[in-house]
Amino acid sequence: MKTIKTSPKYSSKVYNCKVIDLKNVSDSAFVITFEKPDFEFTAGQHVIVSLDGDIHDREYSISSSEEDKNMEILVKEVKDGYFTPLLKNVKIGTYLKVRGPQGRFCIDLINNEDKDIVLIATGTGIAPFRSMVFSYPYLNFQIIHGIQKSTETYFKDDFKCKYTSCTSKESTGDFSGRITEYLKNVEFSQNTIFYLCGNFDMIYDVQNILKSKNHSINSIFTEVYF
């Protein structure tokens, strides 16, 4: 078992990282693999990515494990946006500017190692959870993933823990309907902590559902994805 980190590190240092691979994982999302910057990060943290010569940047959760040789991020392309179409067309061998690590959306391993850990995400909010599951395979994880279409089950085949997809616009997946509808009809032990990553509306609604089931707000940790 690896050494337990007491707190995540935070940095604004910028690194030049060569792109190793770019892979489409759906019709609108892709994974970029690049050289790992010269820093240690804690699963759940994010980096800020920009392109050489461009003033724009975006925050992306790290989806690779703490021990991986290279680093990965999962990106949702915004068709009419400015940054993500440029990012999707980067060439292998070119360099990204990567700043970090940043963020505190991390698991307190010292106090929660014996807990049931439920990871609840919508869309590409699954990214930091892949890092957590791969970095700490000895923990008792369960993933609940809200998506619109079955093609959006990013990383599903990678997970060795229990994974439940909630598909809102197709009658496919493990549950046909929104993630909130699914959660209203399931129960979790009081030994559970919850990590929520996705849009604000989902987080707000899920918090209320969990509180209605007598789960303390102190057992719920959130990260809003825009």
Image: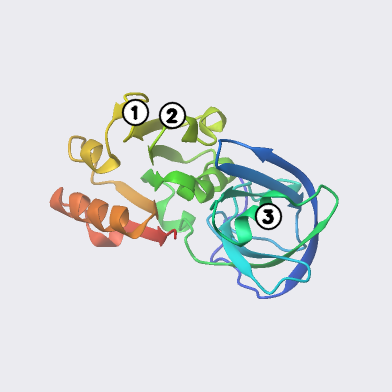
Residue to which mark 3 is pinned: 87
Is there a contact, CB below 8 Å, between mark 3 and mark 1? Answer: no
Upstream in sequence: badge 2 or badge 1: 2
Characterize the local packing of mark 1: few (<14), some (14-19) or many (20 or more) Cα atoms within 10 angstroms. some
Which mark, residue 150? 2
Characterize the local packing of mark 3: few (<14), some (14-19) or many (20 or more) Cα atoms within 10 angstroms. some
**145 left or right of 202 in image:** right
- The secondary element bearing badge 3 is classed as helix
List x then y, in percent, for residue 139: 47, 41
List x then y, in percent, for residue 102: 58, 68
List x then y, in percent, for residue 192: 30, 46
Residue placed furthest toward the front: 80
Q: Amino acid at mark 1?
A: Glu
Upstream in sequence: badge 3 or badge 1: 3
x 34%, y 25%: residue: 174
Where, quadrant-wise, is the N terminus in this rendering?
Answer: top right
**144 left or right of 40 in image:** left
Measured Cα–Cα span from mark 2 to mark 3:
24 Å
Query: Residue 207 or 118: which is nearer the viewer?
Result: 207
Q: Amino acid at mark 3?
A: Leu
Is there a contact, CB below 8 Å, between mark 2 and mark 1? Answer: yes
Residue to which mark 1 is pinned: 170
Q: Amino acid at mark 2?
A: Ser
**76 left or right of 190 in image:** right
Which mark, residue 143? none
Query: Residue 184 or 220: which is nearer the viewer?
Result: 184
x 59%, y 36%: residue: 25
Is residue 10 positioned above or below 59 on the image?
A: below
